[in-house]
Image (cartoon, helix red, strand yellow):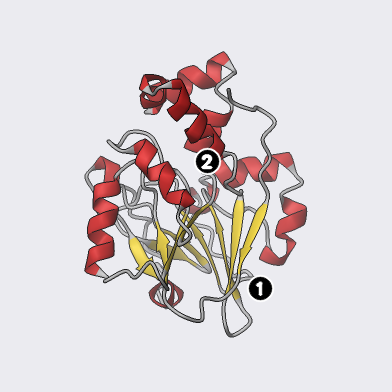
Amino acid sequence: MAKSDHTSGHMVLPPNTRGRDYLLGDLHGCVDALEEAMKLVSFDPEVDRIIAVGDLIDRGPRSLDALKLARQPWFFSTLGNHEIMMLEADDQRTRLMWQQNGGEWFYELTPHSQEVSLAIVETLPHAITLEQEDGTCIGICHAEWPADNWRDIEEILEVPWMRQQMLWGRTVLTQHEVRVDPGAALTVHGHTPLKTPTRLGSALFIDTGCVHGGKLTLIAVNDALTYPELGRKRVPLY
């Protein structure tokens, strides 16, 4: 079953010199919405890639199918807090919290499908660095980036409370923190459902509440890099 000491690390993706890269907000099993979004952008799996911010599972109708996307050579994802709850479900309190937050589907699977699900989740990293052709990079982690410089990601992942913040934190949004990271052109996150993608400084938040009736965000990297900052306006929570 689940491993409570799971500490996935850091994946580095080289620049995509053949096609386009897209960033995906919290999927939560809404695979139909993703398939429709891919059609709208004429996604080509031979050359294009999708990098997701985690929370592939729970609440939506196709959690297992969502996880299986991570086996495709064009799909990458960080861990989300919902995947962490799966991995830590040997703890009774965590299991109850997970079931109350959409994890009941897992216990309706066959033992084999449960094993497949866990095996996939155990391969997901806490953070992804997406390198760009100009030498810059984009940093991706689920909830928020709690440190000052993405170049320190390897060291930050060694700090338990920092990893926890990367999975569960909402400080940047709730306190309207506007920071510019010298180590990344952009950091990209989900976790907190918003009315629209929201950029504060160099941090872009793209969970737009698809599973709650909102629209799934699948945004091209070039569009993400030029996404307008929110400025002094209030964060549009979902």
Quadrant location of residue 228?
bottom left
Q: Residue 189's spot in the image, x, y percent?
A: 48, 55
Left or right: 130 in relation to 147: left
Q: What amino acid type should be assigned to the residue bearing mark 2? A: Ile
Residue 26 in view (yes/no): yes
Res 130 label: none
Q: Residue 199's spot in the image, x, y percent?
A: 43, 65
In this view, the residue farthest toward the front is 112
Q: Tag 1 or tag 2, which sits nearer the N-term?
A: 2
Residue 56 in view (yes/no): no
Helix, strand or loop under label 1 = loop
Residue ID for mark 1:
182
Residue ID for mark 2:
120
In this view, the residue farthest toward the top is 92
Relative to 100, say whether 225 is above or below. Answer: below
Q: Residue 174's spot in the image, x, y percent?
A: 47, 48
Relative to 22, say whether 59 is above or below. Answer: above
Label pair 2/1, CB-CB below 8 angstroms: no
In three-dimensional space, the C-alpha distance between marks 2 and 1, rounded to whole angstroms, equals: 33 Å
